[in-house]
Image: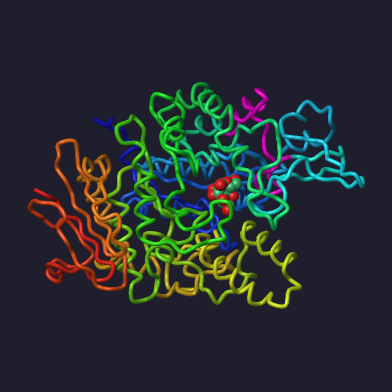
Protein backbone atom coordinates (compact mmCIF):
# COMPACT_ATOMS: atom_id res chain seq x y z
CA UNK A 1 0.00 0.00 0.00
CA UNK A 2 1.19 3.49 -0.82
CA UNK A 3 2.68 5.05 2.27
CA UNK A 4 0.45 7.77 3.81
CA UNK A 5 2.36 11.07 4.22
CA UNK A 6 1.11 14.62 4.88
CA UNK A 7 2.49 16.11 1.69
CA UNK A 8 0.72 13.54 -0.42
CA UNK A 9 -2.63 14.56 1.02
CA UNK A 10 -2.01 18.30 0.97
CA UNK A 11 -3.90 20.73 -1.23
CA UNK A 12 -1.36 23.32 -2.32
CA UNK A 13 -2.28 26.88 -3.32
CA UNK A 14 0.22 28.83 -5.41
CA UNK A 15 0.64 32.54 -4.82
CA UNK A 16 2.37 34.69 -7.40
CA UNK A 17 3.11 37.69 -5.18
CA UNK A 18 3.17 40.59 -7.67
CA UNK A 19 -0.45 40.02 -8.68
CA UNK A 20 -2.01 38.62 -5.54
CA UNK A 21 -2.95 41.42 -3.12
CA UNK A 22 -1.50 44.88 -2.61
CA UNK A 23 -1.68 46.29 0.92
CA UNK A 24 0.03 49.67 0.48
CA UNK A 25 -1.33 51.10 -2.75
CA UNK A 26 1.90 50.96 -4.77
CA UNK A 27 0.19 48.77 -7.37
CA UNK A 28 2.28 45.67 -6.62
CA UNK A 29 1.09 42.76 -4.48
CA UNK A 30 2.96 42.23 -1.21
CA UNK A 31 3.45 39.95 1.79
CA UNK A 32 1.19 41.91 4.19
CA UNK A 33 -1.45 41.58 1.44
CA UNK A 34 -1.00 37.81 1.50
CA UNK A 35 -1.25 37.71 5.29
CA UNK A 36 -4.55 39.61 5.13
CA UNK A 37 -6.08 36.78 3.07
CA UNK A 38 -4.83 33.73 4.98
CA UNK A 39 -8.27 33.02 6.45
CA UNK A 40 -9.74 33.02 2.94
CA UNK A 41 -7.13 30.50 1.78
CA UNK A 42 -7.69 28.33 4.83
CA UNK A 43 -11.45 28.47 4.25
CA UNK A 44 -10.96 27.12 0.72
CA UNK A 45 -9.39 24.02 2.24
CA UNK A 46 -5.72 24.67 1.55
CA UNK A 47 -2.94 22.97 3.53
CA UNK A 48 0.20 24.36 1.93
CA UNK A 49 0.95 27.70 0.30
CA UNK A 50 3.61 27.78 -2.43
CA UNK A 51 4.95 31.28 -2.74
CA UNK A 52 6.60 32.10 -6.07
CA UNK A 53 9.91 34.02 -5.84
CA UNK A 54 9.83 36.88 -3.35
CA UNK A 55 13.62 37.37 -3.23
CA UNK A 56 15.58 40.49 -4.11
CA UNK A 57 15.54 40.77 -7.88
CA UNK A 58 15.67 43.25 -10.76
CA UNK A 59 12.43 41.50 -11.90
CA UNK A 60 13.45 40.87 -15.51
CA UNK A 61 11.69 37.51 -15.18
CA UNK A 62 9.40 38.45 -12.31
CA UNK A 63 11.71 37.25 -9.57
CA UNK A 64 13.03 34.11 -11.30
CA UNK A 65 16.15 36.27 -11.63
CA UNK A 66 17.44 36.47 -8.06
CA UNK A 67 20.11 38.98 -7.06
CA UNK A 68 20.21 37.98 -3.37
CA UNK A 69 18.78 34.70 -2.03
CA UNK A 70 18.78 36.01 1.53
CA UNK A 71 16.77 39.18 1.00
CA UNK A 72 13.14 39.90 0.28
CA UNK A 73 12.24 42.07 -2.73
CA UNK A 74 11.47 45.44 -1.15
CA UNK A 75 8.16 45.98 -2.95
CA UNK A 76 6.91 42.71 -1.47
CA UNK A 77 8.04 43.59 2.07
CA UNK A 78 10.84 42.75 4.48
CA UNK A 79 12.40 39.69 6.01
CA UNK A 80 10.26 40.41 9.07
CA UNK A 81 7.13 40.32 6.92
CA UNK A 82 8.23 36.95 5.59
CA UNK A 83 8.88 35.63 9.11
CA UNK A 84 5.44 36.90 10.02
CA UNK A 85 3.93 35.10 7.02
CA UNK A 86 5.57 31.85 8.12
CA UNK A 87 4.22 32.35 11.65
CA UNK A 88 0.71 33.31 10.57
CA UNK A 89 0.52 30.44 8.10
CA UNK A 90 1.63 27.96 10.77
CA UNK A 91 -0.80 29.47 13.27
CA UNK A 92 -3.65 28.47 10.96
CA UNK A 93 -2.34 24.94 10.63
CA UNK A 94 -1.00 25.50 7.12
CA UNK A 95 2.53 25.27 5.74
CA UNK A 96 4.57 27.50 3.48
CA UNK A 97 6.95 26.45 0.72
CA UNK A 98 9.18 28.75 -1.34
CA UNK A 99 10.39 28.67 -4.93
CA UNK A 100 13.98 27.48 -5.21
CA UNK A 101 15.57 29.04 -8.30
CA UNK A 102 19.07 27.61 -8.53
CA UNK A 103 19.75 26.89 -12.17
CA UNK A 104 20.67 30.54 -12.60
CA UNK A 105 20.90 33.81 -10.70
CA UNK A 106 20.33 37.35 -11.86
CA UNK A 107 23.27 39.00 -13.58
CA UNK A 108 22.97 41.48 -10.68
CA UNK A 109 23.86 38.81 -8.11
CA UNK A 110 27.18 39.55 -6.35
CA UNK A 111 28.47 36.11 -7.46
CA UNK A 112 28.01 36.97 -11.13
CA UNK A 113 29.42 40.47 -10.74
CA UNK A 114 32.59 38.91 -9.39
CA UNK A 115 32.59 36.16 -11.99
CA UNK A 116 32.41 38.58 -14.91
CA UNK A 117 35.01 40.96 -13.44
CA UNK A 118 38.05 39.04 -14.74
CA UNK A 119 39.10 35.67 -16.12
CA UNK A 120 41.14 35.03 -12.99
CA UNK A 121 38.53 35.93 -10.41
CA UNK A 122 37.99 33.00 -7.98
CA UNK A 123 34.28 32.99 -8.93
CA UNK A 124 34.95 32.98 -12.70
CA UNK A 125 34.12 29.29 -12.77
CA UNK A 126 30.85 29.72 -10.84
CA UNK A 127 29.15 30.46 -14.17
CA UNK A 128 29.68 28.98 -17.64
CA UNK A 129 32.09 31.01 -19.80
CA UNK A 130 33.31 30.14 -23.29
CA UNK A 131 35.47 31.94 -25.87
CA UNK A 132 33.86 33.16 -29.10
CA UNK A 133 34.01 31.29 -32.37
CA UNK A 134 35.31 33.27 -35.38
CA UNK A 135 34.30 32.45 -38.95
CA UNK A 136 36.69 32.70 -41.93
CA UNK A 137 35.83 36.39 -42.39
CA UNK A 138 36.76 37.07 -38.80
CA UNK A 139 33.18 37.61 -37.57
CA UNK A 140 32.49 36.71 -33.96
CA UNK A 141 29.84 34.08 -33.11
CA UNK A 142 28.55 32.42 -29.94
CA UNK A 143 30.16 29.07 -29.02
CA UNK A 144 27.21 27.10 -30.47
CA UNK A 145 23.69 27.38 -31.92
CA UNK A 146 21.72 26.80 -28.73
CA UNK A 147 18.51 28.83 -28.54
CA UNK A 148 17.23 30.31 -25.30
CA UNK A 149 13.75 29.67 -23.83
CA UNK A 150 13.20 33.39 -24.18
CA UNK A 151 14.26 33.67 -27.88
CA UNK A 152 17.70 34.37 -29.37
CA UNK A 153 20.99 32.74 -28.38
CA UNK A 154 21.69 31.14 -24.99
CA UNK A 155 25.00 33.00 -25.05
CA UNK A 156 25.74 36.67 -24.35
CA UNK A 157 29.08 38.25 -25.12
CA UNK A 158 30.73 40.17 -22.30
CA UNK A 159 33.03 42.92 -23.64
CA UNK A 160 35.04 43.16 -20.44
CA UNK A 161 36.70 39.76 -20.72
CA UNK A 162 35.92 38.91 -24.35
CA UNK A 163 33.97 35.72 -23.59
CA UNK A 164 30.39 34.51 -23.76
CA UNK A 165 28.37 33.29 -20.76
CA UNK A 166 25.57 30.73 -20.92
CA UNK A 167 21.95 31.54 -20.07
CA UNK A 168 19.18 29.06 -20.90
CA UNK A 169 16.67 31.82 -20.17
CA UNK A 170 17.18 35.63 -20.45
CA UNK A 171 20.64 37.17 -20.80
CA UNK A 172 20.10 38.61 -17.31
CA UNK A 173 19.77 35.03 -15.97
CA UNK A 174 23.27 33.49 -16.25
CA UNK A 175 23.39 29.73 -15.55
CA UNK A 176 25.34 28.68 -12.48
CA UNK A 177 28.12 26.17 -13.00
CA UNK A 178 27.01 23.15 -10.99
CA UNK A 179 30.24 21.32 -11.87
CA UNK A 180 32.00 23.43 -9.26
CA UNK A 181 31.53 22.05 -5.74
CA UNK A 182 32.07 25.45 -4.09
CA UNK A 183 29.24 26.87 -6.19
CA UNK A 184 26.97 24.03 -5.15
CA UNK A 185 27.79 24.47 -1.49
CA UNK A 186 27.17 28.20 -1.71
CA UNK A 187 23.78 27.54 -3.34
CA UNK A 188 22.79 25.02 -0.67
CA UNK A 189 23.75 27.37 2.12
CA UNK A 190 22.32 30.62 0.79
CA UNK A 191 19.27 29.52 -1.20
CA UNK A 192 18.22 26.44 0.76
CA UNK A 193 19.49 26.22 4.33
CA UNK A 194 19.01 29.92 5.06
CA UNK A 195 15.22 29.50 4.56
CA UNK A 196 14.83 26.10 6.18
CA UNK A 197 16.37 27.54 9.31
CA UNK A 198 13.77 30.30 9.25
CA UNK A 199 11.02 27.69 9.30
CA UNK A 200 9.79 27.24 5.74
CA UNK A 201 8.30 23.84 4.99
CA UNK A 202 9.93 23.02 1.70
CA UNK A 203 10.42 24.10 -1.87
CA UNK A 204 9.11 24.02 -5.37
CA UNK A 205 12.38 23.43 -7.21
CA UNK A 206 12.57 25.51 -10.38
CA UNK A 207 13.92 23.94 -13.60
CA UNK A 208 14.96 20.90 -11.56
CA UNK A 209 16.15 18.86 -14.54
CA UNK A 210 18.51 21.45 -16.01
CA UNK A 211 21.51 21.88 -13.69
CA UNK A 212 23.84 19.38 -15.33
CA UNK A 213 24.91 20.33 -18.84
CA UNK A 214 26.49 18.08 -21.47
CA UNK A 215 29.98 19.52 -21.36
CA UNK A 216 30.85 19.07 -25.04
CA UNK A 217 28.71 22.15 -25.80
CA UNK A 218 28.24 20.89 -29.34
CA UNK A 219 25.70 22.32 -31.80
CA UNK A 220 22.08 21.24 -31.43
CA UNK A 221 20.35 19.52 -34.36
CA UNK A 222 18.26 21.76 -36.61
CA UNK A 223 14.61 21.71 -35.51
CA UNK A 224 13.51 25.01 -37.03
CA UNK A 225 15.44 25.53 -40.33
CA UNK A 226 14.31 29.16 -40.56
CA UNK A 227 15.86 30.02 -37.17
CA UNK A 228 19.45 30.85 -36.32
CA UNK A 229 19.17 29.24 -32.88
CA UNK A 230 17.81 25.80 -32.07
CA UNK A 231 16.12 24.04 -29.17
CA UNK A 232 18.84 22.43 -27.08
CA UNK A 233 17.02 20.50 -24.36
CA UNK A 234 18.98 17.31 -25.04
CA UNK A 235 22.11 19.10 -23.77
CA UNK A 236 20.72 20.34 -20.47
CA UNK A 237 17.64 18.27 -19.54
CA UNK A 238 18.45 15.21 -17.34
CA UNK A 239 22.17 15.88 -17.92
CA UNK A 240 24.88 13.38 -16.93
CA UNK A 241 25.23 14.48 -13.28
CA UNK A 242 21.68 15.66 -12.51
CA UNK A 243 20.87 12.83 -10.09
CA UNK A 244 24.17 13.11 -8.31
CA UNK A 245 23.40 16.81 -7.72
CA UNK A 246 19.89 16.17 -6.41
CA UNK A 247 21.10 13.39 -4.14
CA UNK A 248 23.77 15.67 -2.76
CA UNK A 249 21.29 18.48 -2.09
CA UNK A 250 18.95 16.03 -0.36
CA UNK A 251 21.69 14.38 1.59
CA UNK A 252 23.49 17.50 2.76
CA UNK A 253 20.48 19.71 3.55
CA UNK A 254 16.91 18.66 2.79
CA UNK A 255 17.02 15.31 4.62
CA UNK A 256 17.63 17.13 7.91
CA UNK A 257 14.16 18.72 7.86
CA UNK A 258 10.58 17.40 7.67
CA UNK A 259 9.72 19.28 4.49
CA UNK A 260 8.23 18.70 1.06
CA UNK A 261 9.89 19.16 -2.31
CA UNK A 262 8.36 19.29 -5.75
CA UNK A 263 10.66 19.64 -8.73
CA UNK A 264 9.68 21.32 -11.96
CA UNK A 265 10.96 18.78 -14.47
CA UNK A 266 8.59 19.16 -17.41
CA UNK A 267 9.26 16.28 -19.73
CA UNK A 268 10.66 12.88 -18.97
CA UNK A 269 10.13 9.23 -19.64
CA UNK A 270 8.78 6.92 -16.93
CA UNK A 271 12.26 5.63 -16.26
CA UNK A 272 13.73 9.12 -15.93
CA UNK A 273 10.86 10.30 -13.74
CA UNK A 274 11.33 7.49 -11.27
CA UNK A 275 14.95 8.48 -10.79
CA UNK A 276 13.82 11.85 -9.46
CA UNK A 277 10.82 10.87 -7.39
CA UNK A 278 11.08 7.25 -6.36
CA UNK A 279 11.29 7.36 -2.57
CA UNK A 280 14.31 5.11 -2.40
CA UNK A 281 16.28 7.43 -4.68
CA UNK A 282 16.15 10.17 -2.01
CA UNK A 283 16.05 13.15 -4.34
CA UNK A 284 12.64 14.88 -4.22
CA UNK A 285 9.09 13.96 -3.24
CA UNK A 286 7.25 14.68 -6.48
CA UNK A 287 7.56 16.53 -9.74
CA UNK A 288 5.65 18.70 -12.18
CA UNK A 289 5.41 17.15 -15.62
CA UNK A 290 3.99 19.15 -18.54
CA UNK A 291 2.15 16.42 -20.48
CA UNK A 292 -1.22 17.92 -19.61
CA UNK A 293 -0.52 21.67 -19.68
CA UNK A 294 1.37 21.37 -22.94
CA UNK A 295 -1.10 19.13 -24.74
CA UNK A 296 -1.42 20.43 -28.32
CA UNK A 297 1.61 22.72 -28.13
CA UNK A 298 5.10 22.36 -29.52
CA UNK A 299 7.21 21.87 -26.38
CA UNK A 300 10.13 23.64 -28.10
CA UNK A 301 8.04 26.74 -28.78
CA UNK A 302 4.83 27.41 -26.92
CA UNK A 303 3.51 29.87 -29.50
CA UNK A 304 3.52 27.26 -32.27
CA UNK A 305 0.34 25.70 -30.99
CA UNK A 306 -1.89 23.18 -32.64
CA UNK A 307 -5.44 22.22 -31.83
CA UNK A 308 -5.88 19.43 -29.37
CA UNK A 309 -8.81 17.19 -28.56
CA UNK A 310 -10.19 15.44 -25.55
CA UNK A 311 -8.58 12.14 -26.57
CA UNK A 312 -5.10 13.70 -26.39
CA UNK A 313 -6.00 15.38 -23.12
CA UNK A 314 -7.00 12.04 -21.57
CA UNK A 315 -3.81 10.37 -22.78
CA UNK A 316 -1.75 13.20 -21.31
CA UNK A 317 -3.46 12.77 -17.92
CA UNK A 318 -2.81 9.06 -18.14
CA UNK A 319 0.90 9.37 -18.92
CA UNK A 320 1.53 12.15 -16.41
CA UNK A 321 0.03 10.19 -13.52
CA UNK A 322 0.41 6.55 -14.44
CA UNK A 323 4.17 6.25 -14.03
CA UNK A 324 3.84 5.93 -10.24
CA UNK A 325 1.55 2.88 -10.33
CA UNK A 326 3.13 -0.02 -8.54
CA UNK A 327 6.14 2.04 -7.39
CA UNK A 328 7.12 4.02 -4.30
CA UNK A 329 7.02 7.30 -6.27
CA UNK A 330 4.50 10.12 -6.06
CA UNK A 331 2.92 12.52 -8.57
CA UNK A 332 1.17 15.90 -8.82
CA UNK A 333 -2.15 17.11 -10.20
CA UNK A 334 -2.28 20.61 -11.69
CA UNK A 335 -3.64 22.38 -14.76
CA UNK A 336 -2.61 25.96 -13.99
CA UNK A 337 0.43 27.83 -12.73
CA UNK A 338 2.18 31.15 -13.39
CA UNK A 339 3.61 29.86 -16.71
CA UNK A 340 0.32 28.63 -18.14
CA UNK A 341 -2.88 30.13 -19.48
CA UNK A 342 -6.05 29.94 -17.42
CA UNK A 343 -7.50 26.43 -17.49
CA UNK A 344 -11.11 27.45 -18.20
CA UNK A 345 -9.99 29.28 -21.35
CA UNK A 346 -7.82 26.39 -22.41
CA UNK A 347 -9.56 23.18 -21.39
CA UNK A 348 -13.05 24.46 -20.60
CA UNK A 349 -15.06 27.25 -22.14
CA UNK A 350 -14.83 30.87 -20.99
CA UNK A 351 -18.01 32.15 -22.65
CA UNK A 352 -20.58 33.48 -20.13
CA UNK A 353 -22.83 30.50 -20.83
CA UNK A 354 -20.36 27.77 -19.92
CA UNK A 355 -17.66 29.44 -17.84
CA UNK A 356 -18.83 28.45 -14.38
CA UNK A 357 -20.04 25.01 -15.38
CA UNK A 358 -16.80 24.12 -17.20
CA UNK A 359 -14.82 25.49 -14.25
CA UNK A 360 -16.70 23.14 -11.95
CA UNK A 361 -16.09 20.23 -14.32
CA UNK A 362 -12.35 20.93 -14.24
CA UNK A 363 -12.42 21.25 -10.45
CA UNK A 364 -14.13 17.88 -10.17
CA UNK A 365 -11.63 16.35 -12.55
CA UNK A 366 -8.64 17.63 -10.60
CA UNK A 367 -10.09 16.70 -7.22
CA UNK A 368 -10.61 13.08 -8.23
CA UNK A 369 -7.13 12.47 -9.68
CA UNK A 370 -4.26 10.76 -7.87
CA UNK A 371 -1.32 12.81 -6.57
CA UNK A 372 -0.79 16.03 -4.64
CA UNK A 373 -3.20 18.68 -5.84
CA UNK A 374 -2.03 22.19 -6.80
CA UNK A 375 -4.33 25.17 -7.41
CA UNK A 376 -3.17 28.49 -8.78
CA UNK A 377 -4.38 31.84 -7.41
CA UNK A 378 -7.67 32.88 -9.02
CA UNK A 379 -8.37 29.38 -10.33
CA UNK A 380 -10.79 28.88 -7.45
CA UNK A 381 -12.99 31.72 -8.74
CA UNK A 382 -12.59 30.85 -12.42
CA UNK A 383 -10.39 33.68 -13.64
CA UNK A 384 -9.98 33.55 -17.42
CA UNK A 385 -7.41 34.49 -20.05
CA UNK A 386 -6.94 38.13 -21.04
CA UNK A 387 -9.39 39.56 -23.60
CA UNK A 388 -8.31 38.95 -27.23
CA UNK A 389 -8.97 42.62 -27.99
CA UNK A 390 -5.93 43.76 -25.95
CA UNK A 391 -2.86 44.44 -28.07
CA UNK A 392 0.74 43.38 -27.50
CA UNK A 393 1.48 46.47 -25.39
CA UNK A 394 -0.56 44.95 -22.51
CA UNK A 395 1.70 41.88 -22.46
CA UNK A 396 4.63 42.45 -20.10
CA UNK A 397 6.13 38.98 -19.67
CA UNK A 398 9.68 38.67 -21.02
CA UNK A 399 8.67 35.46 -22.81
CA UNK A 400 5.90 37.14 -24.83
CA UNK A 401 7.73 40.44 -25.26
CA UNK A 402 10.95 38.86 -26.60
CA UNK A 403 9.02 36.51 -28.84
CA UNK A 404 7.04 39.31 -30.41
CA UNK A 405 10.16 41.49 -30.79
CA UNK A 406 12.06 38.74 -32.63
CA UNK A 407 9.00 38.06 -34.78
CA UNK A 408 8.72 41.74 -35.70
CA UNK A 409 12.42 42.01 -36.50
CA UNK A 410 12.06 39.11 -38.87
CA UNK A 411 8.72 39.74 -40.54
CA UNK A 412 8.04 43.43 -39.82
CA UNK A 413 8.64 44.52 -43.42
CA UNK A 414 6.55 41.77 -45.05
CA UNK A 415 3.47 42.91 -46.97
CA UNK A 416 1.30 40.50 -44.99
CA UNK A 417 2.79 41.43 -41.61
CA UNK A 418 -0.59 42.52 -40.24
CA UNK A 419 -2.12 39.18 -41.06
CA UNK A 420 0.87 37.27 -39.67
CA UNK A 421 0.88 39.35 -36.54
CA UNK A 422 -2.85 38.82 -36.01
CA UNK A 423 -2.31 35.10 -36.20
CA UNK A 424 0.54 35.26 -33.72
CA UNK A 425 -1.58 37.39 -31.38
CA UNK A 426 -4.22 34.63 -31.43
CA UNK A 427 -1.71 32.18 -30.05
CA UNK A 428 -0.10 34.72 -27.69
CA UNK A 429 -3.57 35.41 -26.33
CA UNK A 430 -4.14 31.69 -25.84
CA UNK A 431 -0.75 30.70 -24.44
CA UNK A 432 1.06 33.73 -22.98
CA UNK A 433 2.14 33.48 -19.37
CA UNK A 434 0.60 36.94 -18.96
CA UNK A 435 -2.79 35.22 -18.82
CA UNK A 436 -1.99 33.87 -15.37
CA UNK A 437 -0.41 37.07 -14.20
CA UNK A 438 -3.24 39.59 -14.21
CA UNK A 439 -4.24 40.80 -10.72
CA UNK A 440 -6.45 38.58 -8.60
CA UNK A 441 -10.03 39.80 -8.78
CA UNK A 442 -11.11 40.32 -5.19
CA UNK A 443 -14.14 42.60 -5.64
CA UNK A 444 -16.29 44.33 -8.26
CA UNK A 445 -14.82 47.65 -7.12
CA UNK A 446 -11.98 49.79 -8.48
CA UNK A 447 -9.06 47.72 -9.86
CA UNK A 448 -10.92 44.60 -8.67
CA UNK A 449 -9.94 45.41 -5.08
CA UNK A 450 -6.37 44.33 -5.86
CA UNK A 451 -4.87 47.74 -5.11
CA UNK A 452 -5.98 51.22 -4.13
CA UNK A 453 -3.35 52.57 -6.55
CA UNK A 454 -2.52 51.88 -10.18
CA UNK A 455 -1.86 48.17 -10.76
CA UNK A 456 1.50 47.29 -12.32
CA UNK A 457 -0.34 45.22 -14.91
CA UNK A 458 -3.86 45.63 -16.22
CA UNK A 459 -6.82 44.02 -14.46
CA UNK A 460 -8.87 41.67 -16.66
CA UNK A 461 -11.99 43.49 -17.94
CA UNK A 462 -14.28 40.79 -16.53
CA UNK A 463 -13.64 41.54 -12.83
CA UNK A 464 -17.20 42.74 -12.26
CA UNK A 465 -18.54 39.29 -13.18
CA UNK A 466 -15.67 37.23 -11.74
CA UNK A 467 -14.47 38.12 -8.25
CA UNK A 468 -13.98 36.62 -4.81
CA UNK A 469 -16.47 38.85 -3.02
CA UNK A 470 -19.44 37.69 -5.08
CA UNK A 471 -18.56 34.01 -4.71
CA UNK A 472 -17.56 33.29 -1.12
CA UNK A 473 -21.11 33.32 0.25
CA UNK A 474 -22.89 32.01 -2.83
CA UNK A 475 -23.71 28.32 -2.50
CA UNK A 476 -23.81 27.90 -6.29
CA UNK A 477 -20.52 29.61 -7.01
CA UNK A 478 -17.38 28.02 -8.38
CA UNK A 479 -15.57 28.92 -5.16
CA UNK A 480 -18.12 26.96 -3.09
CA UNK A 481 -17.89 24.06 -5.52
CA UNK A 482 -14.10 24.00 -5.08
CA UNK A 483 -14.48 24.10 -1.32
CA UNK A 484 -16.90 21.18 -1.35
CA UNK A 485 -15.02 19.02 -3.81
CA UNK A 486 -11.74 19.52 -1.93
CA UNK A 487 -13.47 18.32 1.24
CA UNK A 488 -14.82 15.28 -0.58
CA UNK A 489 -11.35 14.54 -1.94
CA UNK A 490 -10.02 14.38 1.60
CA UNK A 491 -12.96 12.46 2.98
CA UNK A 492 -12.46 9.72 0.35
CA UNK A 493 -8.74 10.06 0.15
CA UNK A 494 -8.09 6.34 -0.42
CA UNK A 495 -10.02 6.65 -3.65
CA UNK A 496 -9.17 10.08 -4.92
CA UNK A 497 -5.73 10.94 -3.52
CA UNK A 498 -4.24 7.44 -3.40
CA UNK A 499 -6.45 5.34 -5.68
CA UNK A 500 -5.49 3.79 -8.99
CA UNK A 501 -6.77 5.40 -12.20
CA UNK A 502 -8.30 3.79 -15.26
CA UNK A 503 -9.80 5.54 -18.28
CA UNK A 504 -12.91 3.75 -19.58
CA UNK A 505 -13.53 5.63 -22.83
CA UNK A 506 -10.16 6.72 -24.23
CA UNK A 507 -11.40 7.25 -27.79
CA UNK A 508 -14.59 9.13 -26.88
CA UNK A 509 -14.13 12.74 -28.07
CA UNK A 510 -16.89 14.25 -25.95
CA UNK A 511 -17.02 12.49 -22.60
CA UNK A 512 -14.24 11.57 -20.18
CA UNK A 513 -15.08 8.58 -18.01
CA UNK A 514 -12.70 6.98 -15.55
CA UNK A 515 -12.60 4.72 -12.57
CA UNK A 516 -10.72 5.27 -9.33
CA UNK A 517 -10.12 2.23 -7.15
CA UNK A 518 -8.74 2.01 -3.62
CA UNK A 519 -6.67 -0.72 -1.95
CA UNK A 520 -9.87 -2.48 -0.79
CA UNK A 521 -11.25 -2.62 -4.31
CA UNK A 522 -13.87 0.06 -3.66
CA UNK A 523 -14.38 2.23 -6.74
CA UNK A 524 -15.55 5.68 -7.77
CA UNK A 525 -16.87 6.40 -11.25
CA UNK A 526 -16.29 9.82 -12.80
CA UNK A 527 -18.01 11.04 -15.98
CA UNK A 528 -17.46 14.51 -17.43
CA UNK A 529 -18.97 16.01 -20.55
CA UNK A 530 -16.23 18.15 -22.10
CA UNK A 531 -18.45 19.75 -24.72
CA UNK A 532 -21.08 22.42 -25.25
CA UNK A 533 -23.56 19.78 -26.48
CA UNK A 534 -25.58 17.18 -24.63
CA UNK A 535 -23.90 13.76 -24.44
CA UNK A 536 -25.10 10.27 -23.60
CA UNK A 537 -24.28 9.12 -20.08
CA UNK A 538 -23.30 5.46 -20.07
CA UNK A 539 -22.61 3.08 -17.23
CA UNK A 540 -19.51 1.36 -18.57
CA UNK A 541 -19.06 -0.92 -15.57
CA UNK A 542 -21.42 -3.06 -13.48
CA UNK A 543 -22.51 -2.13 -9.98
CA UNK A 544 -24.79 0.16 -8.09
CA UNK A 545 -24.18 3.84 -8.83
CA UNK A 546 -24.56 6.22 -5.87
CA UNK A 547 -24.10 9.86 -6.81
CA UNK A 548 -21.50 11.49 -4.57
CA UNK A 549 -21.20 14.93 -6.14
CA UNK A 550 -21.99 16.78 -9.34
CA UNK A 551 -22.20 20.25 -10.85
CA UNK A 552 -25.88 19.73 -11.66
CA UNK A 553 -28.38 19.55 -8.77
CA UNK A 554 -29.47 15.96 -8.15
CA UNK A 555 -33.13 16.74 -8.90
CA UNK A 556 -32.24 18.13 -12.32
CA UNK A 557 -29.90 15.35 -13.41
CA UNK A 558 -31.23 13.15 -16.21
CA UNK A 559 -30.65 9.42 -16.21
CA UNK A 560 -29.04 8.87 -19.61
CA UNK A 561 -27.83 12.36 -20.48
CA UNK A 562 -25.00 14.66 -19.50
CA UNK A 563 -25.74 18.33 -20.14
CA UNK A 564 -22.86 20.54 -21.43
CA UNK A 565 -19.89 20.31 -19.04
CA UNK A 566 -21.88 18.23 -16.60
CA UNK A 567 -19.54 16.33 -14.29
CA UNK A 568 -20.55 13.54 -11.91
CA UNK A 569 -18.74 11.36 -9.46
CA UNK A 570 -20.44 8.19 -8.17
CA UNK A 571 -19.46 5.70 -5.51
CA UNK A 572 -19.88 2.16 -6.79
CA UNK A 573 -21.10 -0.68 -4.69
O1 LIG B 1 10.14 27.66 -15.92
C1 LIG B 1 10.91 26.79 -16.65
C2 LIG B 1 10.36 26.29 -17.94
O2 LIG B 1 10.93 25.41 -18.52
C3 LIG B 1 9.13 26.79 -18.58
O3 LIG B 1 7.94 26.53 -18.03
C4 LIG B 1 9.29 28.14 -19.18
O4 LIG B 1 8.72 29.15 -18.43
C5 LIG B 1 8.60 28.15 -20.52
O5 LIG B 1 9.08 27.09 -21.26
C6 LIG B 1 8.88 29.42 -21.27
O6 LIG B 1 8.22 29.35 -22.50
C7 LIG B 1 10.64 28.17 -14.72
C8 LIG B 1 9.67 29.15 -14.11
O7 LIG B 1 8.48 28.50 -13.79
C9 LIG B 1 9.47 30.30 -15.05
O8 LIG B 1 8.53 31.22 -14.58
C10 LIG B 1 10.80 30.98 -15.22
O9 LIG B 1 10.70 31.98 -16.18
C11 LIG B 1 11.89 29.99 -15.63
O10 LIG B 1 11.89 28.81 -14.88
C12 LIG B 1 13.25 30.60 -15.45
O11 LIG B 1 13.55 30.68 -14.08
Find residue 334 and report its horizontal and vertical position in percent: 40, 50
Please tell me which residue is depicted at 77% across the width and 35% down the height of the picture. 129
The percent position of residue 525, horizontal first and vertical second, equals 19, 52
**Residue 479 seen from this side:** yes
Position above or below: 348 against 331: below
Closest to the observer: 147 or 46? 147
Q: Is residue 373 left or right of residue 137?
A: left
Position of residue 454 relative to residue 520, above or below, is below
Q: Residue at x 67, y 43 (%)?
A: 220
Whether residue 76 can be seen here: no
Where does the image place residue 325, in percent across and percent down from the top left? 31, 36
Judge left or right: residue 530 versus residue 401: left
Name the spot of residue 523 as percent of width and height, x first: 16, 46
Residue extent of the magenta highlight: 166-191
Residue at 29 percent of width and 51 percent of height: 367
- Residue 186 highlighted magenta (yes or no): yes
Res 499 quadrant in image:
top left
Q: Nearer the viewer, residue 268 or 364?
A: 268
Amino acid sequence: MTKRIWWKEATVYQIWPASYKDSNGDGVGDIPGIISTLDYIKDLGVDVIWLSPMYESPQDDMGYDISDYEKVYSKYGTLEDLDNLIEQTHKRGMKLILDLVINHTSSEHAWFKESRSSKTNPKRDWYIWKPPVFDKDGNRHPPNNWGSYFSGSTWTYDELTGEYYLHLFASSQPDLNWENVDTRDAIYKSAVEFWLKRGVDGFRIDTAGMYSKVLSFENAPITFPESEFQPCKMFHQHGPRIHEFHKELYDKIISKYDVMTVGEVGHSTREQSLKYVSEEEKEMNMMFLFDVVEVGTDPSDRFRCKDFNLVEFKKAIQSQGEFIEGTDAWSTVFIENHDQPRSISRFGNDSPEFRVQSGKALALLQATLTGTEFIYQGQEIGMTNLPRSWDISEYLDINSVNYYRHFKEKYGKDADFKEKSNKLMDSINLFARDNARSPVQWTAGKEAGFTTGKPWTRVNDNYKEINVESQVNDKNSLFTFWKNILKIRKEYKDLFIYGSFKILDTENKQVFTFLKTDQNNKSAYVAINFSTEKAPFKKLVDGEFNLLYSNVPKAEAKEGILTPYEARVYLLS
